[in-house]
Image (cartoon, helix red, strand yellow):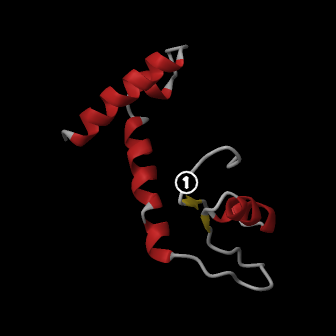
Amino acid sequence: MITGHQAGAFILDKAYDSDAVVAAAQRQGAEAVVPPKKNRNVPRDYDKHLYKERKKVEWLINLIKQYRRIATRYEKTARNVLGFVHVASIMVLLR
């Protein structure tokens, strides 16, 4: 999933807490910001302040999904979907 993407940090949820995902992020020169699962033998440290920024992205996505055209995926081409995502994002920001 993260192969081929350039980023300074990959912010993922607990479901992606595995040594393979962390190693893949480090091979690309990025930091893996993943909170450790409760059943992990040796809990790994992560940047808690950076992880809190993840919720802002999730909130925006949930607000955008309130627009019916985005949620039901009426548009078939990526260009049109991206256009409506831009329009919905502007509408959310203008609230």
Q: Position of residue 11 (x, y in %)?
A: 56, 60
Q: Residue 80 location, x and y as percent?
A: 44, 16
Seen at 58% across and 49% down, the residue is 6
Q: Quadrant of the C terminus?
A: top left
Report the residue that reaches farthest toward the left. 94
Nearest to the observer: residue 6 or residue 38: 6
Q: Residue at x 77, y 66 (%)?
A: 18
Horizontally, residue 64 falls left or right of residue 23, namely: left
Looking at this view, name the residue that lies furthest to the bottom.
Answer: 42
Question: Foreground: 45 or 35?
Answer: 45
With 80 as the anchor, is 94 left or right in this view? left
Where 80 falls versus 23 (above or below)?
Answer: above
Q: Above or below — where is 54 with respect to 58?
A: below
Asked which quadrant contains residue 46, the reply is bottom right
Residue 43 appears in which quarter of the rendering? bottom right
Q: Secondary structure at mark 1?
A: loop
User: Which residue is under mark 1?
Assistant: 7
The residue at the point 42 percent across, 21 percent down is 69
Query: In the rendered view, would you say 20 is above or below 86?
Result: below
Query: Total number of numbered labels?
Result: 1
Specify the amino acid type for callout 1. Answer: Ala
